[in-house]
């Protein structure tokens, strides 16, 4: 076994219960000087504080090499569409971009007060929506009078004349409603994710009650949500998408899962049907030139794997120079994306000889993981990572690490960002006083832990929970309801922007609203921003918190935030090569 010296992220031990702030609201008094070698387009890690306005993305930061190779190297899945992307290499720019950054706090240059009430939030969002409308509309942007093009800043154009015969820009829209489709897992091992559209519907209904969707033509509408159970099976998703667009004739549609997205996004783009804010992390969702109608809202799995690898690489010498990393990998698109991304990172690391990687595979939703965890424990690893979707396995991994005696031997253990909800890691799930989960790390994708009692006084969280209760849902019952409220908020804002554009609510206006979305998301921790900018910035979310679970406070304690906004290049996905062209 290698050296077990406990290390720290910003001098806070990954398994320690001291040194770090006990909540996002308690800023550490420890500070370091800002990095003296932070370069444009690099991964930046900075201490996050309440009251600090998230860094706003800007167009044209297309240096593109920070994570491009890591992205195309990590797009694994369980079918031919997703693929492992093993043909690519990690550019040395990745090395220079991340070297030394994970242990340096870089100061934010845009500080402002976070709203403290929903009234303040709504006032801010109204200003941001107006700015998006103005930006799209300037210089004659928007949907052309003859209905043949939709244009935005920077020369962004959607050719509506290429849409199929019989296509309608307002199909799925009536004088009273607009119809949104959500094929999603309502049953099966990933059924909890099926709560996402239910929560989104609750948020959209709340906005409709306030007549938020009255468009520039003076028509007031509400959302009609059509949910279908795809059981997280891509083949079922394909059939249900056909039903939703051909029989239900939905205005727009959103899916859950990488393979589910990859099997359907080509058709939605060919049919000119908006497919915004999909719950998946595949780089193919960032292709605004060839696929302008589709986008995602989650951190790319390959970026998460890059952060894991960089953290380990930069702490090797503190850990004795060599480590063994063990992973438990779910054999679906999510798990394999993490696994292959991490493999590629190690294979191209200058310290690859010092990092041994072992893994065990499991079927998603398997009832027990004791056997593979026993096998991994026998390998005597230094680092453990669970790589898989949000499921009961998040909790099982914590319990099995403790029961196998690994917790006291490991230098660090990571949950994937999918498992951030406290309903996976809280004391009531892991048992006893919750100490089994103490010190676990996560690259959390920037999202607040919606289920945490620590956020009871957060105005957005409190309001969103009220909307869930009004719709008959207990926010504590699911790890996905919080993510659903985040999705519902994005849809609500983009729909309002689309409606405010000349011509009112149309598919092309909605596509423009999504592609130029740039607002302050209340569901994200300070320091993380969301936004896209036409063809120049193709991904909505490119940052993450790095957090540690504090069992005593039953909360994630933010150690740092990583901001890659505007640096991830667009990806024209090549199915045959399983890589970005």
Image: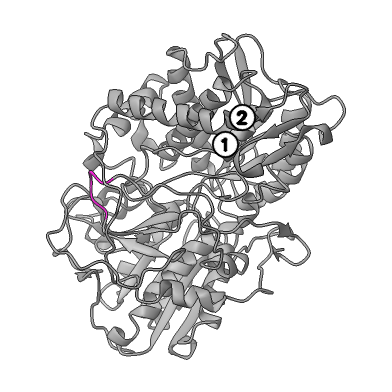
Residue 374 found in image quarter: bottom left
Image location of residue 260, percent across then percent down: 66, 47
The secondary structure making up most of the magenta span is: loop
Image location of residue 343, percent across then percent down: 55, 76
Does 499 sit left or right of 33 as displayed?
right
Q: Residue at x 21, y 68 (%)?
A: 33
Residue 159 found in image quarter: top right
Q: Residue 237 lies in magenta, yes or no?
A: no
**Label 1: which residue?**
514
Image location of residue 215, percent across then percent down: 56, 15
Q: Residue at x 32, y 87 (%)?
A: 317
Does 355 sit left or right of 548 as displayed?
right
* Mark 1 Cα-neighbour bin, 10 Å: few <14, some 14–19, many ≥20: many
Q: Secondary structure at mark 1?
A: helix
Q: Residue at x 48, y 23 (%)?
A: 204
Q: How many marks?
A: 2
Does 348 sit left or right of 56 as displayed?
right
Image location of residue 149, percent across then percent down: 74, 32
Residue 510: image tag? 2
Q: Secondary structure at mark 2?
A: helix
Residue 133: image tag? none
What stretch of residues is rendered in magenta? 48-52
Q: Tell me whether the residue at label 2 lies in contact with that at label 1, contact meaning CB atoms closer than 8 angstroms.
A: yes
Does 511 sit left or right of 171 as displayed?
left
Is residue 185 in view from this perspective?
A: no
Above or below residue 185? Residue 471 is above
């Amino acid at each position: 076994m290698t050296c077990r010296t406990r290390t720290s992220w910003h001098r806070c031990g990954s398994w320690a219960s001291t040194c770090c702030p006990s909540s996002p609201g308690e800023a550490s008094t420890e500070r370091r000087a800002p990095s003296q070698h932070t370069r444009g387009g690099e991964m930046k890690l900075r201490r996050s504080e309440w009251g600090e306005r998230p860094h706003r993305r800007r167009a044209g930061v297309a240096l593109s090499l920070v994570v491009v190779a890591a992205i195309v190297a990590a797009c694994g899945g369980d079918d031919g569409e997703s693929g492992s992307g093993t043909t690519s290499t990690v550019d040395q720019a990745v090395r220079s971009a991340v070297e030394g950054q994970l242990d340096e706090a870089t100061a934010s240059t845009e500080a402002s007060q976070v709203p403290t009430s929903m009234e303040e939030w709504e006032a801010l969002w109204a200003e941001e929506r107006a700015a998006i409308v103005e930006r799209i509309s300037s210089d004659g942007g928007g949907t052309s009078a003859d209905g043949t093009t939709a244009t935005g800043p920077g020369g962004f154009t959607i050719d509506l004349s290429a849409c199929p015969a019989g296509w309608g820009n307002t199909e799925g829209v009536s004088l009273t409603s607009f119809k949104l489709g959500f094929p999603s897992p309502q049953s099966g091992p990933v059924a909890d994710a099926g709560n996402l559209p239910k929560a989104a519907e609750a948020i959209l209904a709340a906005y409709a009650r306030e007549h938020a969707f009255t468009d520039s033509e003076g028509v007031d509408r509400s959302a009609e949500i059509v949910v279908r159970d795809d059981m997280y099976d891509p083949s079922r998703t394909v059939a249900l998408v056909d039903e939703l667009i051909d029989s239900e004739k939905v205005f727009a549609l959103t899916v859950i899962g990488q393979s589910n997205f990859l099997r359907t996004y080509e058709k939605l783009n060919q049919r000119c049907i908006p497919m915004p804010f999909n719950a998946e992390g595949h780089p193919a969702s960032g292709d605004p030139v060839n696929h302008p109608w589709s986008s995602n809202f989650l951190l790319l799995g390959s970026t998460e794997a890059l952060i894991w690898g960089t953290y380990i690489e930069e702490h090797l010498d503190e850990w004795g120079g060599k480590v063994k990393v063990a992973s438990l990998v779910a054999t679906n698109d999510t798990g394999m994306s993490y696994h292959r991304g991490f493999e590629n990172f190690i294979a191209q690391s200058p310290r690859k000889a010092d990092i041994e990687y072992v893994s065990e595979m499991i079927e998603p939703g398997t009832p027990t993981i004791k056997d593979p965890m026993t096998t991994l424990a026998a390998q005597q690893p230094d680092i453990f990572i669970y790589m898989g979707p949000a499921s009961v396995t998040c909790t099982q991994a914590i319990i099995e690490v403790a029961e196998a005696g690994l917790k006291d031997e490991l230098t660090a253990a990571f949950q994937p960002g999918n498992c951030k909800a406290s309903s996976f890691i809280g004391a009531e799930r892991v048992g006893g006083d919750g100490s089994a989960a103490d010190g676990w790390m996560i690259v959390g994708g920037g999202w607040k832990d919606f289920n945490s009692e620590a956020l009871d006084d957060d105005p957005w969280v409190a309001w969103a929970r009220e909307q869930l209760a009004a719709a008959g849902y207990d926010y504590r019952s699911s790890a996905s309801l919080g993510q659903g409220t985040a999705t519902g908020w994005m849809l609500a804002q983009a729909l309002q922007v689309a409606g405010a554009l000349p011509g009112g609510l149309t598919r092309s206006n909605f596509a423009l609203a999504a592609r130029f979305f740039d607002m302050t998301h209340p569901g994200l921790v300070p320091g993380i921003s969301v936004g896209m900018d036409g063809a120049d910035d193709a991904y909505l979310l490119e940052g993450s918190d790095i957090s540690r679970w504090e069992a005593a406070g039953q909360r994630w304690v933010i150690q740092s935030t990583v901001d890659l906004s505007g640096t991830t290049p667009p990806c024209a996905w090549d199915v045959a090569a399983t890589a970005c062209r």
